[in-house]
Image (spheres, rainbow, N blue to C red):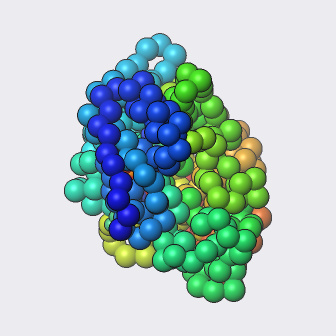
Amino acid sequence: MKTLSNINASSISDAVAAAQQALGNGQSIAFSGGGTDLLQQIKDGTDRSDVIINLRNVTDASQITSNGSGTAIGGLITLTDLSGSDVSAVLAEAAASVGTPQIRNVATLSGNVTQRPWCWYYRNGFNCYKAGGNECFSVVGENQQHAIFGGGPSFIVHPSDVAPALVALNASFVVSGPAGERSLSAQEFFVLPSQNPQQENVLAPGELLSGVNIPSAPSNTVSTYHKIMDREAWTHAEVSVAAVLTLAGNRVEAASIVLGGVATIPWKLDAVESFLVGKELTEAVVREAGALAVADAQPLTKNGHKVPMTSAAVERTLMSLASV
Ligand SMILES: Cc1cc2nc3c(=O)[nH]c(=O)nc-3n(C[C@H](O)[C@H](O)[C@H](O)COP(=O)(O)OP(=O)(O)OC[C@H]3O[C@@H](n4cnc5c(N)ncnc54)[C@H](O)[C@@H]3O)c2cc1C
Ligand code: SF4
């Protein structure tokens, strides 16, 4: 393992300044929230930063504050605190679904959203696109858990459980860096591998995700997060569905549905959303919605099972909201 140094930041501005100074000295940096992913990256050599900027002591970015127009959530909030919050069911359930209680007690919202891919080739030292190389080993290799949407040239699945919930809630992402603060929509924050095969988001060196803002929703809004895994607990999604519906009785007034575990970014189902608006949530309608959800799926050689799994997950998630 290489030698690295650690800086304990006490505020977001302190962290940005420390990053700027290290980068100015020609050193590479990584921010650490709970460190539950970063430590693994350091051990397996996918992160070779010179300086770790530890955000654990940052106290100005772990609160939830609400006003008439929405809710601001600090990026350093732990997943345990997020899962116990009453901001939105879909967000609390997504946070509660991550890993183990021990992980959730230290892992942060920002670290969850910015965690790196868990593709076994990348994590085991293969020099693929994500590692700066110019090939993807999963295309002709072991791709059982890879993407059926948004793939090429890398076919990772975006690993975050919290990200699909945030996208479904139409959250904006607050990024802090040397030029100050900027706010981005999910469409602007997450990037497809065709846009940048090495990164999953637009963060530039020295920039960090400091929080998210969630707009207020009508009072007749319901939401939920359903996650299917390849074992009973403590792992990433094989398929997940974040659904936010505004309902008048059982009729859909507005729908926001985002998939996790099956695409290179949180995957918004625009066509399904449009299809649902104005319809009653009957069994026939949710079945059609499930079929529509996978109409554009492009499975690889060994992950075809994700297609029926995804349509069934969409059906089941919608049906669970119909009975609320
Ligand atoms: C056994 C196990 C099971 C897991 N299961 C799940 C699961 O079910 N679902 C899931 O989503 N994840 C899972 N994870 C992955 C990971 O541990 C969690 O996603 C966790 O939420 C990461 O948060 P963290 O604060 O510990 O991130 P860290 O490890 O601190 O950081 C993760 C990455 O984000 C960067 N980073 C951290 N904070 C910031 C910031 N504020 N701005 C910009 N970059 C930042 C780091 O440099 C690093 O590259 C699992 C991990 C393990 C080891
Ligand atoms: S899917 Fe992405 S991370 Fe995995 S081998 Fe291909 S390029 Fe690398």
Give the residue at the far top of this rendering. 68
Query: On the rendered image, what quadrant is the N terminus found in?
Result: bottom left
Q: Nearer the viewer, residue 35 or 223?
A: 35
Q: Is residue 207 above or below residue 129?
A: above
Q: Residue at x 52, y 29 (%)?
A: 176
Q: How far from the left and from the top, in percent, is residue 134? A: 72, 71
Position of 121 relative to 140 (above/below): above
Q: Residue furthest front?
A: 25
Q: Is residue 105 left or right of residue 277?
A: left
Q: Position of residue 241 (x, y in %)?
A: 53, 56
- The residue lying at 68 percent from left, 38 percent from top is 188
Please give the name of the residue rendered at 31% of the width and 45% of the height, measured from the top-left corner: 6
**Left or right: 210 with respect to 285?**
left
Q: Is residue 68 left or right of residue 294?
A: left
Q: Which residue is more in the foreground, 72 or 311?
A: 72
Q: Residue at x 63, y 31 (%)?
A: 184
Establish if 63 lies above or below 298: above
Q: Ligand 2 is found in which quarter of the picture?
A: bottom right
| Quadrant of res 303 | bottom right
Image vertical order of residue 112 relative to residue 87, above or below:
below
Q: Using the rendered image of the protein, determine whether residue 49 is visible from the camera's viewpoint.
A: yes
Q: Where does residue 231 sit, x and y in percent of width and height? A: 37, 76
**In screen coordinates, is 93 left or right of 257?**
left
Among the 4 quarters of the image, the one containing residue 62: top left
Q: Position of residue 166 (x, y in %)?
A: 52, 41
Q: Is residue 288 visible?
A: no
- Image quadrant occupied by the C terminus: top left
